[in-house]
Amino acid sequence: MAPRLAKALAPIPPRDSVYGVAPSCVANRAAGLPGMVFLKTRDLFPDSPEVFWPPENPEAMRKATRDALASVNMDMIKPGDSVNLLGSHHGWTILGGGPYTEMIETVKDVIQERTGCTDIRLRAGVGLRFRETEEYIKRFGLDTYFGGKARGMAPIDEGIPIETEIGTLYGIKRAYDAKWIVHTHNSDVREIHFHRHVDRAVKPFSMSYARIESRSTYHHNLGPRGANFTARAIFNSRFVQDKWAFACFFKPTPAGIVGVTANNNLYTLNEEVTRLNMATYGKMMTLLGKVKDAIAVLDFCCPVPYVFCGGVIYANFCSANIDLLDLEQPLPSYTWYTESYYGENEKPLLPETPPMNPAIRACVINYAWVGYPSVFWAKHTPTIIVGEDHARLFREDSQNTEFVDYAKEVVPDLDTAMAHAYGMAKTDKVIIFDGAGGGINCSRSLAEELLARAPEVSREVDATLMPKWLKQRGLQ
């Protein structure tokens, strides 16, 4: 018997940010549109792990963190030492940011309780939105919790040379200005188009904690998969290893947060999250790849590619026409929806480059941030922008000055946008990227299609795809 589809879930609320319109400008949310429902991940995949968030559960998050840290060695940290908790802006975009905050605060508390060390700082990196972590630090009161020692880091901040086996690479000096470092992160797949789940847990060492020269190896110089060794080179360097204490990750899945893991050995932790993600995100992304036509509505407090639905981001859906976890896919190291691989004629530089997912027939931007170069999406997907406030935001963003020029139109409200999108896309299937936890807000027609396809996808991943993905990475 098919599960009863619930009313669409309330999405993550808009946030005040220099990168988004004022929350008052977001008059209506897509989840409130007629015919929208909430499809639980556990109804799609009943074997999904049990979760403890959502619903919001700070106590469970703190307990899971303490339980994970119980087996971690902290003997290297002495009372008079200094410790930097290294973090990333991405963690605060998952389920409203509360889970990440609770984990970070608990890590600080446990270090202080077990070692007597009081000089514990938070150093949180960003990508291209240089003020984003500062906003999160203030929003969640982390500047107070860390006694004024919580700071954001940008990839243009002062660097520090790190000698590695492949030569000199550059970290951010502020990340390493303590005797010890603790890597506090999350295991979601997010930018799988970059890391291809090769050393996923190690990637921040050449992204969130590195100067822009090292970050650019992913985006431009070497291509996504080819750049993975730079993160490993930085992490394995004598400089970093002499400061290394341990890592602590919370573990989100498309169904919600299933736990926290901590380890002194980052590669052991990496193997653990690789297995978890292939068994969970692997099913969700494979299922989304079966969708033949849909209207994507972006309605979340992140830039265009980073808005969430079913635990994955819009960039993942844009790539769902190939298997991102399969390292044998043609041109697996290219991110085909970045302009780096397209010429002035908007054609791929290499003819075999896969196109953006053709299932996306139209895109409606009801709420999204700037601060990431997104013009490519407006060029390659019919795009409708809701509200002149959004249009002005994109026009005034240095990375998106042409976005509105390539969009199909700017309309005054969401209802008008959807009416135009239905006519343009010739489908009634809608998928909403609004951060709703534990599942997908979507149209009933799409929910029914996903429910029908999910059992076959689950069997395919368990029996065929996951063994292949693991074998490609040298895992049993």
Image (spheres, rainbow, N blue to C red):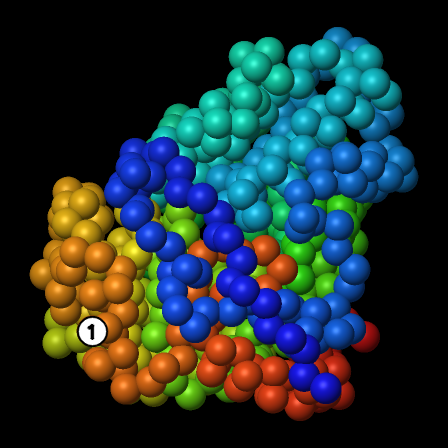
Q: Is residue 2 above or below residue 147?
A: below
Q: Is residue 463 above or below residue 69?
A: below
Q: Which residue is mark 1?
A: 420
Residue 378 place in picture, x, y as percent = 22, 66
Q: Nearer the viewer, residue 452 or 290?
A: 452
Label 1: how many residues lie within 10 Å, few (<14), some (14-19) or many (20+)?
some
Indicate left or right for 5 with 51 as reference: left
Residue 444 place in picture, x, y as percent = 49, 78
Q: Is residue 213 visible?
A: yes
For image coordinates 40% across by 38% down, the residue present is 15
Q: Nearer the viewer, residue 203 or 323?
A: 323
Q: Nearer the viewer, residue 87 or 171?
A: 87
Residue 167 place in picture, x, y as percent = 50, 46
For image coordinates 53% across by 78% down, the residue present is 447
Q: Amino acid at mark 1?
A: His
Q: Is residue 253 above or below residue 295?
A: above
